[in-house]
Amino acid sequence: QKEVEQNSGPLSVPEGAIASLNCTYSDRGSQSFFWYRQYSGKSPELIMFIYSNGDKEDGRFTAQLNKASQYVSLLIRDSQPSDSATYLCAVNTGNQFYFGTGTSLTVIP
Amino acid sequence: DGGITQSPKYLFRKEGQNVTLSCEQNLNHDAMYWYRQDPGQGLRLIYYSQIVNDFQKGDIAEGYSVSREKKESFPLTVTSAQKNPTAFYLCASSEAFPYEQYFGPGTRLTVT
């Protein structure tokens, strides 16, 4: 069983819509959870992190964590073409980080 | 500017040669990491270090070596023993809890 699982997509949404990205993890001892955006050929950029159950909002981004269900999600409101990228979910468990394989998002103008 | 630098951006080597990738950070982070990324795959951990002069193997350490003589620097050597060295190599560092991890720009290594 993979540590972190994401739907690979591709996920397509129209400009202005809400994009919803999901991630599940296997280790109940995981402490903190991250969403990275990665443009093609570039390194991952941290856009959100969360470590308490519930929602955390930052601008157009909302991260949601449900530790009982071992589920993390990222909502992107008012999606823009510049949001088109691969989104990586990462989980910190002790000294290590585990990454999903990423969800490819395309925002259609 | 605070951040992580990696050099070179692109690196080409012949099979059988060792090559060293540079990683420097001025974020004053204690922990540093090396990952490789292959097309269609997630990031895989090669080595990590939480303090100077100490480091641990990650999931795919075979064929790689590291050193951590200074807090700011964590170079990675890809040895000739690494069977498939062509990949995108990413260095990262993180602070204490909640362990926000930041990445450098990466080095794309091609071995022929």
Image (cartoon, coloured by chain):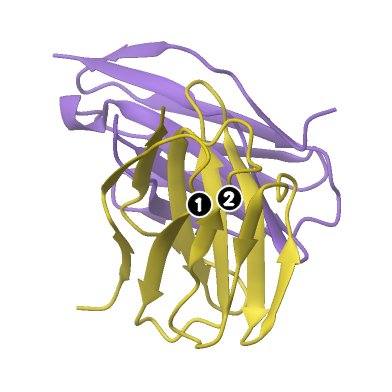
Check the residue under mark 2 and report the chain it is in.
B
- Does residue B101 appear anywhere in the picture? no
- At horizontal 41% and vertical 21% (from top left) the residue drawn is A104
Q: Which chain is yellow?
A: B
Asked whether the beta carbons under mark 2 and mark 1 sit within 8 Å of each other, the answer is: yes
Mark identifier at residue B18:
1
Query: Which residue reaches farthest left?
Result: A109
Crowd around label 2: few <14 · some 14–19 · many ≥20 (10 Å): some
Mark identifier at residue B79:
2
Is residue A99 left or right of A14 when viewed as pictured?
Answer: right
Residue B60: % across, % down = 71, 44
- At horizontal 50% and vertical 88% (from top left) the residue drawn is B70
Mark found first going from the N terminus, 2 or 1:
1
Crowd around label 1: few <14 · some 14–19 · many ≥20 (10 Å): some
- Chain A, chosen colour in render: purple
Q: Quadrant of residue A70?
A: top right
Q: Quadrant of residue B48?
A: bottom right
